[in-house]
Amino acid sequence: MIRDIYSRDAEAPKFNDATLEVSDALSQLIIKIENVLFTRKGEVLGSPGIGCSLDELIFSLVLNENTIENNINSQITAYCLPDFAGFDVNTKVSFFSTLERDGCLVDIFVNEQRVIGALF
């Protein structure tokens, strides 16, 4: 069984400080997707193409939901899915406006189950 280092950020909602490694494929995939989502392009030495630069995409003010979804999906396909056959990953980006604020919700679904949600 393949094991991976537990690399979830200490400030992440589901962080578990007692975990050092993960061995189930779904948890490994989710951690890899989180790393790609919240990494800026150029931050990973030796792999300048890794990273969604999500903040820049969302706050650019010129991109629509489909363009952002396509960018996220291409990153996930290139850097996360080659090691995880059998998982269907989809992205949903929604802009919203309320009286208090404007924002964006990014949801990642694996096999039609929401596994990551990010509010900007």
Image: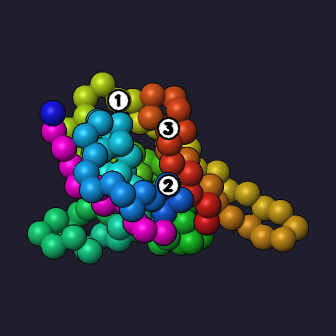
Q: Secondary structure at mark 2?
A: loop
Is residue 81 part of the magenta span, yes or no? Answer: no
- Residue type at numbered disc 1: Phe
How crowded is the residue under tag 2: few (<14 C-alpha within 10 Å), some, or many (20+)?
A: few
Quick check: 76 above or below 20? above
Q: Residue furthest left?
A: 46
- Residue type at numbered disc 3: Phe
Left or right: where does residue 21 sit relative to residue 119? left
Left or right: where does residue 71 sit relative to residue 4? right
The answer to which of marks 2 and 1 sits earlier in the sequence is 2
Q: Is most of the magenta stretch helix, strand or loop?
A: loop
Q: Which residue is mark 3?
A: 109
Q: Which residues are magenta?
A: 2-11
Between marks 3 and 2, how big is the CA–CA gap?
Answer: 17 Å
Q: Residue furthest top?
A: 86
**Rendered location of residue 55, percent (x, y):** 49, 70
